[in-house]
Image: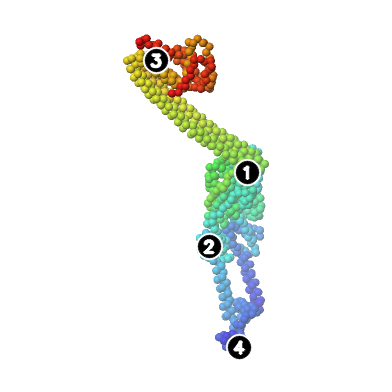
Amino acid sequence: MTQTKLLAVIGLVVLGIIIVNGTVYSVDERERAVVVRFGQVIRYDDKPGLHFKQPFLDAVHFFPAQILTLEVEPQQIPTIEKKYVVVDSYVKWRIADVLKYFVALGGDELKARDRLSQVINSGLRGEFGKRTMHDVIAGDRAKIMEVLSVNADKAASEYGIEVVDVRIQRVELPPQVRGSVYERMKSERGRIAKELRAKGAEQAEKIRANAERQRDILLAEAYRDAQRIRGEGDARVTGITGRAFGVNPEFYALYRSLSAYRESFKNKDDMLVVDPSADFFKYFKNPRRGAPSGQ
Amino acid sequence: MAWNEPGGSGGKDPWGQRRKEQGPPDLDQILKNIRNKLTGLFGGKRGGANNESVNRYGMWLIIGVALVLWLLSGFYIVQQSERGVVLRFGKKSEITGPGGLHWHWPFPIEHVEKVNVEQVSTLWIGRRNDKSVGAAGADSGYMLTEDENIIVIEFSVQYKVKDPGDYLFNVRDPVSTIVQATESAVREVVGKSQLDFIMTEGQFEVADKTRVLLQQILDRYKCGIQITQVQMQKASPPDDVKAAFEDAIKAREDGDRYIQDAKAYENDIIPRARGGAARLIQEAQGYKASVTARAEGDARRFTSIEKEYAKAPGVTRERMYLETMEQVLSSTSKIFVDLKGGNNVLYLPLEKLVPRASASDAGPVNTLQPLPEPMERSAPAAANSERARDSSRERGTR
């Protein structure tokens, strides 16, 4: 008897749990729930917290309420100049309208991603095809992303999806084009290197030339001044001697000649070939030659 | 003597006759007890009337203990650096912390998720063989600049959790969201910058712009993350063109070196030239002063002599002449030639008399007297020619 009672009790507990479990469900902050009864959505906007439903009759579907990420596969996309770039991007999206999402896509996230990819890809092609390479890389990147976001949001709203953001990650050149870019970069560097060296040489040459010019001018001016000073000296000498010697030019000639002789023949190496008939030697041969005058 | 001594006669112990029932419990007995208690709980009056009250108390005790244990399971510890986010039936109810012992309603009513809000984490972007960059792959650091050059950039991004609620609930996988957003933001900034700018003075600016843009993007997602720092770890040209870039850098150095060399040259020659110029002037002034002084000296001397000369011109003239000739002839070598002898064929072997005439400069031809004979400088050691008659040689040693 006690055993049957025990079983009954256990059964009651299990039944209770099942009923509670079937009646009560909690929705996490990260989720939204849709309650479906016989294929008909009867409630779809449950906020996080505790909720009730009819046991057995109602089925609850949970959907993520967070922002989700779709990484779009890298694509080769032509720009307006028919240059191909590799673009990869990501989409931040979330389920805004759970009912629409559930109805349109059956709540299948894979399907949603697929649709989004298509929307983004065609959007990318459209926007890139209108722009030049330079615009795509530099100028219009933010604008492209803006346009893509708005368009994708519009397109996805029929699935109950809100596109929070579309962002281009990489815009790169395809590997086969890189080589030529590298070549261009190399030659550009070569040009810069040459220019830098030449500019350095230019400056250096200017500095040297300027230095030499200054040197030459300095020396020449110094020479000029020096000559002027010397000239003044010479002039003064001329003046002084002229005044002094002019008193007796005849005596000056004698005086100066004699001193010149002294200066000219003072070396032992100088050899004179002397004629004894010279006046100097008049007493050398004949001591009496001048005597009569004396006697 | 022990009370529980087995086999003792007439067991006298404090528990009296109950002693036997309290013996070592066997399994059957326990099961039976539990069954009794359970049946007692659910109103079974059959199970031994004497045990009924005991069973009820036991029942409540068990329930009470279970309840207490259940409530105790709601205690949790939050570290100083953490925040606890309490979810009641999945709905965020409160945020606890920083630090301490807290309590929440136990499962299944509430549960807590802890988030570290102080810890600064670092993500590396663009580093090779880094798996965290995902789809970007091996060459994720390659970026196109505004001038359509390719640059390799490595970034580190440091972040921490700013709002634990947002961090937990708003975005699925916030960390890879940061990576994606950084990849995008960096490229947007790099795409607007010139290669040279990024590699030289623009490093900080690019990193800073990236940080601002990245924070804007993340705030748009409300993912509760604060970017504390974005640093450009490396910005270099791709390996294929590195040599060219290095040469360009070297060229800059070379150019500077040329200029420095030229400046050194300038600094060398100009002071020297200044010195040379000063020397020229000084020499000229020296010349001027000295020739003037000499001239004055000469003039005075002449004037003095002239005064005396004027008193007795004839004698003075003779005296001066003789003194001069004496001095001249005594200090030089002489060859005495008497041309009056009639022998006109006089040969003076000057080459022998003057062995070094060719080496030394040609001496001036001086005429001592009205004499048509050349007088040459000659070596003192010159030998007499056998032809020369009447020649006397005298060493001019004095």
Give the Cα separation between the discs numbered 1 and 2.
Answer: 49 Å
Give the Cα separation between the discs numbered 1 and 4.
Answer: 98 Å
Spot occupied by residue B27 in the image (x, y as percentages of width and height)? 64, 78
The chain holding disc 2 is B
Label 1: how many Cα within 10 Å (few below 14, some 14–19, many 20+): few
Q: Splitting the image into 4 quarters, where does residue B40 fall?
A: bottom right
Checking the image for residue A142, the label placed there is none
Which residue position holds label 1? B239
**Marks 1 and 2 share the same chain:** yes
**Marks 4 and 2 share the same chain:** yes
Checking the image for residue B78, the label placed there is 2
Give the Cα separation between the discs numbered 3 and 4.
Answer: 175 Å
Can residue A151 be seen in this snapshot? Answer: no
In the rendered structure, are the residues bearing label 1 and label 2 in contact, judged by CB atoms less than 8 Å apart?
A: no
Disc 3, SS: helix
Disc 1 marks a residue whose amino acid type is: Asp
Checking the image for residue A253, the label placed there is 3
**Marks 3 and 4 share the same chain:** no
